[in-house]
Every structure is written in structure tokens, then in C-alpha cells.
Amino acid sequence: MGRKTIEKNWPFLIHPTITVLLTAGFQGRDTITPIGWIMPLSGEPPLLALALKETRFGYELLRKSGEFGINVPSFNQAEKVWRCGKTSGREEDKFALTGFSREKGEAIKAPMIKEAIAWLECQLFEDKPFGDHRLIVGKVLRARVKEEVFDQNYQENFLPCLHLRKNLFLTTDWATKIAAGEGD
Ligand SMILES: Cc1cc2nc3c(=O)[nH]c(=O)nc-3n(C[C@H](O)[C@H](O)[C@H](O)COP(=O)(O)O)c2cc1C
């Protein structure tokens, strides 16, 4: 079997990643920025990290306001996710574009997305440049979930919007429970 070297598309070898919708607002302007490069960073204190390009309107707004929302969409919202990723909030109102509704958060002023299935309200904790992206670390001030999804059938009800590459999304339609070992 042969092997080939790939030049620039290597990040997609570590996809699919869960796609979230970052919301940020400042002085009456707001936006929804889809983010695929995100991960939990610390349990205590609760921190998450994401990679964000400086050119995104979402970056400008979270820098100015010092806070942002992470809204978890479900797979059936993939088309709206895609549309949010094709335009900038500088030119278009993404809530009007998608039909998503603004909802007040409990801990931050940035608008949250009512139709999401989980919500993390974050305070900007760290912001550093790394190559062509910035590493944004958020402190999670409030985490909430939709009860109907995150119940005892969690693995069946939670259909995340996973981004494979370009306009290709997928979700899970099964889950495997590994035989429990010591301490599980
Ligand atoms: C599925 C998907 C994942 C994306 N992931 C990221 C990401 O992790 N970081 C980033 O800077 N941009 C990412 N983008 C691109 C931005 O979402 C896109 O440029 C968006 O239009 C920026 O909007 P804004 O200018 O209103 O912030 C992603 C786009 C899509 C569709």
C-alpha cells in the first residue's frame, strides 16, 4: 500500500470535530461564528479553548466585551451552521439570516441562541496569537443543557453537528459502551 504526503489539509485528519456556535455582542452589534476547533481545557477552574482567526467579527466582539457564548447546535441545524460560516456578522445579521432567536444569558450579556441544545456562558480568560489563529480560553461561568436531550437516553438523543470537512457534516447514530473496567 502506498502512502502520500499531504500539504495543507492535515487538520482535517483530526476531524470530525463538534461544531459549536460562538455568540458575541458589543454595543448593539452581535454575531454567530461557527467553531470547529474547540476543546475542554480544565475542569477546575472550568476552562475551554478554541482557535479563532483574528479577522472574524466574533473575535472583535469578544475582545471588546470580554465574554462570549458557546451554543451547541444539533445535527438538524447543520444547514444554518453552514450559512453562519459563509458570511460575516459585519455584513449580515446572522439571527435574521438563520431564524435563530436571541436569548438572554444568565451570566453574560452576549446573546445566546434559544434553539441550541446546550449553552456555555464564558468570560474571556486568555487570548494569544498562534500562527494564523488566536488561542482563546474561556472561563465557563454557566453551563446549561436542554433537559429533553440530556436525560438517561443521552447517547441516543444527543445528535451533535460534527464537521468532517468543507460542507460535509455528520452525526452519531449509534454509541458503543465499552465493557466497564475497574473504577468505571
Ligand atoms: C463548520 C465550520 C467550522 C468553523 N470553524 C472555525 C474555527 O474553529 N475557527 C475560526 O476562526 N473559524 C471557523 N470557521 C469559519 C467562521 O465561522 C466563518 O469565517 C464565519 O463566517 C465568521 O463569521 P464572523 O465574521 O461573523 O465572526 C468555521 C466555519 C464552519 C462552517
Image (spheres, grey):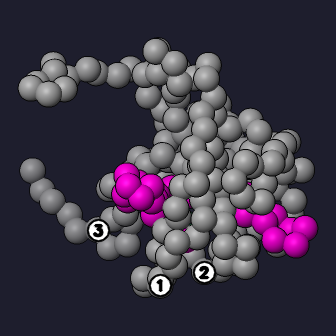
Q: Is residue 132 above or below residue 170?
A: below
Residue 53, position as x, y percentages in the image? 57, 76
In-front residue for pair 134/77: 134
Q: Residues within 10 Å of mark 3 (few under 14, many from 20)?
A: few
In-front residue for pair 74/86: 74
Kindly identify the amino acid type of the residue bearing the numbered disc 3. Answer: Ile
Residue position for label 2: 54
Residue position for label 3: 6
Residue 111, position as x, y percentages in the image? 78, 54
Residue 174, position as x, y percentages in the image? 38, 20
What is the spatial separation of the Cα atoms under label 3 and label 2, in whole angstroms?
26 Å
- The label on residue 129 is 1
Query: Mark 1 touching mark 2, by CB under 8 A?
Result: yes
Label 2 residue near ligand 1, CB within 8 Å? no
The magenta stretch is 23-52
Label 1 residue near ligand 1, CB within 8 Å? no
